[in-house]
Image (cartoon, grey):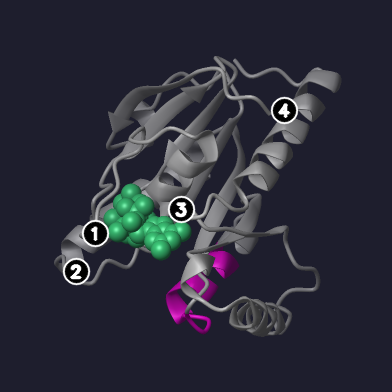
Amino acid sequence: MVIKTAEFVKSSSRWQDCPEPIFPEYAFIGRSNVGKSSLINAMLNFKDLAKTSQTPGKTQLINHFIINEKWYLTDLPGYGYARVSKSMRRDFEKINTNYMLNRKNLANLFVLIDSRHTPQLIDVEFIEWCGENGIPFSIVFTKTDKLKPNTVIANIEHYKTELLKTWEDLPEIYVTSAEKKIGGDEILKFISKTNQFFVENKIVFE
Ligand code: GTP
Ligand code: MG
């Protein structure tokens, strides 16, 4: 997909305040600092569209971008950020949960996982929650440039084995590096195909 335009639309603290759900929407979620905003920028080839930071917890609102005037891309607040109070963490979770359960035009959620770590309970539980609630999702491994290729493969295999303990089938998996601009094209291809499906099947968003 050629990215002709990518524009920030608005930041919202509640799903009710998000832009009108008139386009298919693709959201990026994952632990704080996993690389959501960086991957969005790398994938779209825009340097500072989504704000990135070395300090976890940078994205605290639901950020909407409109791409090619045809689909929404959403940067969600990171979950599991340890250095905020429990009640604040619960507030973030509520923002995300309500958004995911209520956003009618949500076509797919990209769940980002840091490729360097063994499966973390918080991510595994989140993925289970998506399944239980019928949220369509894919898994995206991030920061693969920080590892040797063999370690990336081993870690992902380990992850798949872990998921297959509770899942019959695995979701789509993407292997990415924002730093090296790897994997973004595959994600865009999926988005393009999904958008095409909506057009061909006359599924309208209004
Ligand atoms: P929050 O908004 O706080 O939830 O974080 P986020 O998930 O949006 O992470 P962000 O994109 O801000 O990146 C966090 C840190 O990881 C930054 O210092 C990035 O430069 C770094 N980072 C992100 N992606 C990559 C990557 O692919 N490779 C490397 N080496 N570093 C990355
Ligand atoms: Mg961010």
In this rendered view, identify the residue nearer to me: 155 or 167: 155
The part of the image, by quadrant, that contains residue 104 is: top right
Q: Earlier in the sequence, mark 1 or mark 2?
A: 1
Q: Which quarter of the figure is the C terminus placed in?
A: top right
Stretch in magenta: 117-129
Query: What amino acid does circle 4 point to?
Result: Asn
Confirm whether residue 134 shows in the render. Answer: no
Q: Nearer the viewer, mark 3 or mark 2?
A: 3
Q: Which residue is mark 4?
A: 195
Q: CA distance from mark 4 to mark 1?
A: 33 Å
Secondary structure state at the residue bearing disc 4: helix
- Position of residue 49 in the picture relative to residue 145 (left or right): left
Mark 1 close to ligand 1, CB under 8 Å: yes
Secondary structure state at the residue bearing disc 2: helix
Secondary structure state at the residue bearing disc 1: loop
Confirm whether residue 176 shows in the render. Answer: yes
Query: For the point 65% across and 38% down, which residue is it?
Result: 188
- Name the spot of residue 125 as percent of width and height, x first: 51, 73
- Name the spot of residue 192 as percent of width and height, x first: 72, 31
Q: Which residue is mark 1?
A: 54
The part of the image, by quadrant, that contains residue 33 is: bottom left
In this rendered view, identify the residue nearer to me: 134 or 70: 70
- Name the spot of residue 108 as percent of width and height, x first: 62, 43
Query: What amino acid does circle 1 point to?
Result: Gln
- Name the spot of residue 67 as percent of width and height, x first: 53, 23
Q: CA distance from mark 3 to mark 2?
A: 19 Å
Q: Which residue is mark 3?
A: 29
Q: Earlier in the sequence, mark 4 or mark 1?
A: 1
Q: CA distance from mark 1 to mark 2?
A: 21 Å
